[in-house]
Image: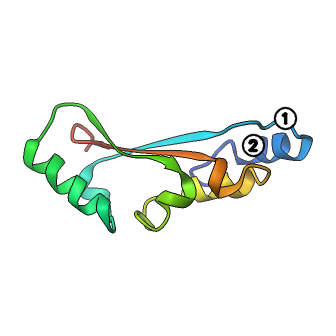
Amino acid sequence: PSGALWGAQDINKMACRGTLHSLCITMKKHPGSLKLQGELIEKLEKILEEKPEGEVVLYEGSVRGLCPLAPNNVNTMAAAALAGFNLGFDKVQAKLVCDLSLT
């Protein structure tokens, strides 16, 4: 099953063949759907106070770094890190974007 990560099998095939050299996955979410921990709570609160138009990057870095900060929102990213086993949680990059325009 692929769920939200439709390319999981392709990512895994590339990892098996040794052709997967990098992977970055971006998720855009409305702030109401985010369940955050730690420093991301404060960052989101500031964003909600300012109410910027468009997108704001909440996190950009390794999937490993993001998992404990947004454990309910990054299952797809964790699945990508597992599929791309040759890169793993440290080398697969994650970008979590807050977008007030999403419903």
Q: Total of numbered circles in the picture?
A: 2
Depicted 22 relative to depicted 71: above or below: above
Q: Residue at image x 46%, y 68%?
A: 68
**x, y percent for residue 30:** 28, 48
Name the amino acid type tagged 1. Answer: Thr
Q: Residues within 10 Å of mark 1 (few under 14, many from 20)?
A: few
Name the amino acid type tagged 2. Answer: Ile
Checking the image for residue 8, the label placed there is none
In this view, the residue farthest toward the top is 54
Q: Residues within 10 Å of mark 2 (few under 14, many from 20)?
A: many
Left or right: where 22 falls relative to 30 = right
Depicted 17 relative to depicted 38: above or below: above
Q: Residue at image x 84%, y 35%?
A: 19
Labels 2 and 1 touching (C-beta < 8 A): no
| Quarter of the image that includes the N terminus | bottom right
First reached walking from the N terminus: tag 2 or tag 1:
2
Checking the image for residue 19, the label placed there is 1
**x, y percent for residue 84:** 74, 49
Residue 58 visible in rendering? yes
Question: Quadrant of the rendered structure where residue 57 is?
Answer: top left
Q: Residue at image x 55%, y 42%?
A: 25
Left or right: where 40 falls relative to 23 = left
Residue bearing the label numbered 2: 11
**x, y percent for residue 51:** 11, 41
- Mark 2 residue element: helix
Left or right: where 102 falls relative to 20 = left
